[in-house]
Image (spheres, rainbow, N blue to C red):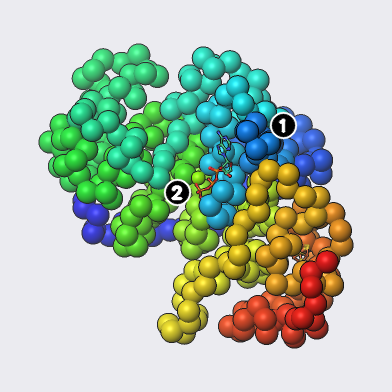
C-alpha cells in the first residue's frame, strides 16, 4: 500500500475521557484497578528555572484517558502541550525542572518511578511519536534494524523473530513490499512513508498508550489525512489509547473522542468531541475554530489565526490568561483566574471562563453564522471602545 492508497476511514465515537476537573477540583477517583482509567493526570504542573525567572510551562492540568480512546490536546505554540506529555514519560526530569502532581498509569504514579523503571515502560507500554520522523530515525541505520532494536529492547526474542515483527508492522502501516523495504534506509522513503515507519516502530511492542506529538504537521494535507486514517484504523484493530497533540483543531475533529484545549499551560476547555464542535464555549476555542476550514462554510471565507500573541509564562498574572487577547473581555469578567468548572446542563463539558451563559450564547450565534468577533461583541452589548480594565 502507498501513501496515495485508500485506508479505512475514521470511526468517530463519542466516549469517555477527561472527566475530572482541573487542579484542586479533581475528585479522588479511587476506582478498583480493573475499572481504573488507563491514564489519569492529576493537577500536573511543570516549571523551569531560567535566568529570567520561573517559566511555568504547565500550570496544573488534569485529564483522563480511557483504554482504547483518543484524547486530543490542542493549543497554539508554547501552550505546554509537549512539556506536559514529555513529563508523563520522564523526559523533562532535569535539574532546572520542578514537577508536581500525579500521573497515574494503570494506577501507578509514573512521577514516582525511577529513571530505570520508566525506561522499561517507555517504548513498551507507552510509546511516543514525534513531529519530525527524520530526527527520530537514525539516517545511517536500516529501517528494519531500528525497529528490530526497539523490539529487542523490551522482548527476549531472536533477531530473526524481531525482524519478522518488523516486516509484519511495516505491512500493517501500509509500506508496500515490506519484506524488501525492511532493509531500506530512511532517506529512501518519502515523508509520509517515514511517518508510517515511526508509527510501525511505536506500535511494534503493542503499547497500551501512544502519545503522538504533532504526528502529521510536517506532511502535506493529503498525506496527513491518510496518516490520521491509518492511526484511527490501527487504534481500532489494536485497541491502543492515543493522546494526540496538535495545534490544529481540524486534526482531532475526526480522530478524537475527547478534546482538551490548552492555553498558556492550562486547560481552558474540555469536552467530548461532538459536544466541543457543536457547542464550543471558550473565546479561545472560538478563535481556533475560525482558523480551520469548515465544510459548511463558503469556500471564500478567509481563515484567520487567533489575534495577538500568547502571554509570557514567566510571572503569569492572577487573572484569566486569555484576557489580553479576548475580544469579549470588556465588562465581562471577574478578576482572578477562572476555575475549570463543569458547564451547567452539560457536566462532561468543562470551561475556564466567567462570561455569563446568555452572553456566550449570543456571541456564538453570531460567530457560527460567519460573523466577526467585533460583530459578535456588538451583538452581545460589549462596548467596543472600552479599555480592558
Ligand atoms: N527546558 C525548558 N526550559 C525553559 N523553558 C522551557 C523548557 N522546555 C519548554 N519550555 C517552555 O515551555 C513552554 C511550553 O513549551 P512546549 O514545548 O510544551 O509548547 P508546545 O505547546 O508543545 O508548543 P509547539 O506547538 O510549538 O510544539 C514554552 O514557552 C517553552 O519555551
Ligand atoms: S474570563 Fe473573560 S477574558 Fe477570560 S476568556 Fe472568558 S470572557 Fe475572555
Ligand atoms: Mg510541542
Measuring 48% from the left and 82% from the top, which residue is drawn there?
301
Mark 2 and ligand 3: say if the CB distance to the nearest ligand atom is below 8 Å. Answer: yes
Work out whether residue 177 or residue 3 is closer to the camera in this orientation and state it.
3
The residue carrying mark 1 is 101
Work out whether residue 207 or residue 260 is closer to the camera in this orientation and state it.
260
The residue carrying mark 2 is 214
Residue 365 in view (yes/no): no
Measuring 79% from the left and 69% from the top, which residue is drawn there?
388
For this view, does 32 lie left or right of residue 193? right
- Report the label total: 2
Tell me the element at label 1.
strand
Please, is residue 361 above or below residue 255 in the view?
Answer: below
* Quarter of the displayed picture in which ligand 1 can be seen: top right
Quadrant of image for the C terminus: bottom right
Residue 159 percent across, percent down from the top left:
23, 17
Measuring 16% from the left and 42% from the top, which residue is drawn there?
188
Q: Which mark is residue 57?
A: none
Tell me the element at label 2.
loop
Q: Give the mark nearer the N terminus: 1 vs 2.
A: 1
Amino acid at each position: 500500500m502507498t501513501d496515495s492508497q485508500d485506508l479505512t476511514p475514521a470511526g468517530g465515537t463519542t466516549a469517555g475521557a477527561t472527566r475530572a476537573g482541573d487542579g484542586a477540583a479533581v475528585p479522588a477517583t479511587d476506582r478498583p484497578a480493573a475499572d481504573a482509567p488507563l491514564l489519569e493526570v492529576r493537577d500536573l504542573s511543570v516549571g523551569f528555572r531560567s535566568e529570567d525567572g520561573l517559566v511555568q510551562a504547565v500550570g496544573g492540568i488534569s485529564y483522563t484517558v480511557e483504554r482504547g480512546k483518543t484524547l486530543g490536546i490542542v493549543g497554539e505554540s508554547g501552550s505546554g502541550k509537549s512539556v506536559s506529555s514529555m513529563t508523563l514519560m520522564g523526559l523533562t526530569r532535569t535539574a532546572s525542572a520542578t514537577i508536581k502532581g500525579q500521573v497515574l498509569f494503570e494506577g501507578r504514579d509514573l512521577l514516582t518511578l525511577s529513571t530505570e523503571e520508566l525506561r522499561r515502560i517507555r517504548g513498551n507500554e507507552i510509546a511516543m511519536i514525534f513531529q519530525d520522523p527524520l530526527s527520530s530515525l537514525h539516517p545511517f541505520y536500516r529501517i528494519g534494524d531500528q525497529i528490530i532494536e526497539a523490539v529487542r529492547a523490551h522482548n527476549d526474542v531472536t533477531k530473526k523473530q524481531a525482524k519478522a515483527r518488523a516486516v509484519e508492522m511495516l505491512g500493517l502501516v501500509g509500506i508496500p513490499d515490506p519484506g524488501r523495504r525492511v532493509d531500506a534506509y530512511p532517506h529512501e522513503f518519502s515523508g509520509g512513508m517515514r511517518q508510517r515507519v515511526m508509527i510501525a516502530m511505536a506500535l511494534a511492542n503493542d503499547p497500551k498508550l501512544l502519545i503522538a506529538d504533532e504526528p502529521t504537521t510536517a506532511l502535506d494535507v493529503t498525506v496527513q489525512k491518510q496518516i490520521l486514517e491509518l492511526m484511527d484504523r490501527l487504534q481500532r484493530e489494536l485497541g491502543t489509547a492515543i493522546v494526540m497533540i496538535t495545534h490544529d483543531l481540524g486534526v482531532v475533529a475526526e480522530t478524537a473522542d475527547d478534546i482538551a484545549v490548552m492555553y498558556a499551560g492550562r486547560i481552558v476547555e474540555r469536552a467530548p468531541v461532538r459536544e466541543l464542535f457543536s457547542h464550543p464555549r471558550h473565546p479561545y476555542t472560538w478563535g481556533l475554530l475560525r482558523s480551520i476550514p469548515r465544510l459548511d462554510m463558503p469556500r471564500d471565507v478567509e481563515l484567520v489565526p487567533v489575534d495577538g500573541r500568547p502571554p509570557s509564562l514567566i510571572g503569569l498574572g492572577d487573572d484569566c490568561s486569555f484576557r489580553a487577547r479576548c475580544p469579549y473581555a470588556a465588562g465581562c469578567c471577574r478578576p482572578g483566574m477562572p476555575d475549570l468548572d463543569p458547564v451547567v446542563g452539560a457536566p462532561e463539558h468543562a470551561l475556564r471562563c466567567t462570561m455569563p451563559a446568555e452572553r456566550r450564547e449570543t456571541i456564538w450565534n453570531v460567530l457560527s453564522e460567519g460573523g466577526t468577533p467585533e460583530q459578535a461583541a456588538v451583538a452581545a452589548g460589549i462596548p467596543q471602545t472600552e479599555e480592558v480594565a
